[in-house]
Image (cartoon, rainbow, N blue to C red):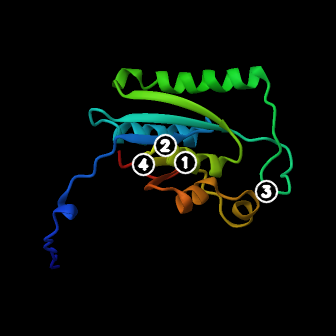
Amino acid sequence: MKTATVATNSAAEDAAIIIRKILVPTDFSSASKRAFSYALRFAEEPGSKIILLHVLEPETPLTLAGQPAAAAFSEEELSDTEESLRALADSAETTGINTRSIVRTGVAAHEIVEAAKDLDVDLVVIATHGFTGWKHFAIGSTAERVARAAPCPVLVVREKDHDFI
């Protein structure tokens, strides 16, 4: 079998890909923790950092504008979320990778995309549960919506797939 090589003349095509800021949305599931482990590998370059994001989604119906009505979350719920984010960030402490966390409220896909824009991230690493068929249609896919709208590359990590890291 013959292999072909393609010669390029563009310096931009030969430039290294530099990833400095990685956004990792998490719902604290095993799939999200798996995505975080992928992000840790991408953040091994000196100067790279990971931003963990958790979105508290209101359980209220949408308003006429299509946005959820203002939701009040209890102090306990906010405290538990911040504690879970801190624990996840602390788990990366031994790697020496700079990690910070953010909590936002709203529709998850929208808030993730907005955070990617606001923070000017280089990569989003997000988990998917891999639902198909009716379950995918009924539940929707946050990862799919983020991949379609994000201002940067998105790595979608499946829960039950092979590892390459």
Q: Position of residue 88 (x, y in %)?
A: 52, 27
Looking at the rendered structure, which numbered label has been put on residue 35? 2
Q: Position of residue 106 (x, y in %)?
A: 71, 43
**Precedes in sequence: disc 1 or disc 2:** 2
Give the amino acid type for the residue marked by disc 1 in the picture.
Answer: Ala
Report, in whole angstroms, how far the alpha carbon at label 1 lies from the one at label 4. 13 Å
Q: State the SS at label 3.
A: loop
Q: Which badge, 3 or 1, is on the more N-terminal residue?
A: 3
Task: State how far apart marks 1 and 2 are (Cα).
Answer: 5 Å
Q: Is residue 131 above or below residue 88?
A: below
- Position of residue 14 relative to residue 101, above or below, is below
Alpha carbon distance from label 2 to label 3: 30 Å
Q: Which mark is residue 66?
A: 3
Provide the residue designation for mark 4. Answer: 123
Whether label 1 touches label 2, CB < 8 Å = yes
C-alpha separation, residue under disc 2 versus residue under disc 4: 12 Å
